[in-house]
Image (cartoon, grey):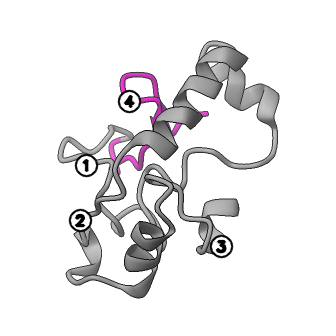
Amino acid sequence: HNLYDQSTGLMRPKNSRGEFDRNFNPVSWGGGYTEGSAWHHSFPPFAIDVLASLHGGASNLAAKLHELVDTPGTFHPGGYGQTIHEMEEMRAFAMGQYGHNNQPCHH
């Protein structure tokens, strides 16, 4: 629960002082995320009741999931420093920020 940021509705890494990174970009890959961005690591497919609670209820979670697929499939290489194939595959899949091709999205 401590990585969920209510202001963005996404999971965010924290620094050594326990603070959210100020340079947050939800479409930036790497950094605190493995082969993905905040969008990919914010909807773990377990404890759905907890995830819904974090979002303020099931309808709010559903709205955020719609936002996931409605947000353009743009990306920033971030910590990778270059485009990696998972970024291009996500964009080619054409479901917004959802990256079904990449297993970390399902952990």
Alpha-carbon neighbours of circle 2 within 10 Å: few (<14), some, or many (≥20)? some
Viewer-side label of 2, 1:
2
Q: Residue 103 carries which label?
A: 3
Residue at the image point whose x is 34% and y is 50% from the top: 72
Q: Which one is earlier in the sequence, the residue at label 4 or at label 2?
A: 4
CA gap between label 3 and label 4 equals 23 Å
Q: What stretch is highlighted in magenta?
A: 1-17
The amino acid sitting under disc 1 is Asn
Q: In which quarter of the image is residue 104?
A: bottom right
Residue at point 38%, 29% (across, down): 8
Q: Which of marks 4 and 1 is nearer the N terminus?
A: 4
Q: What residue type is labelled 3?
A: Gln
- The residues bearing labels 4 and 1 have C-alpha atoms spaced at a distance of 10 Å
Q: Distance between the residues labelled 2 and 1?
A: 8 Å
Q: Circle 4 sits on which residue? A: 8
| Circles 2 and 1: CB atoms closer than 8 Å | yes
Please tell me whether the stretch drawn in magenta is mainly helix, strand or loop: loop
- Numbered label attached to residue 40: none
| Nearer-N-terminus badge (3/4) | 4
* Quadrant in the picture for the N terminus: top right
Which mark, by number, is residue 76?
A: 2
- The residue singled out by tag 1 in the image is 25
Q: Which of marks 3 and 1 precedes in the sequence?
A: 1
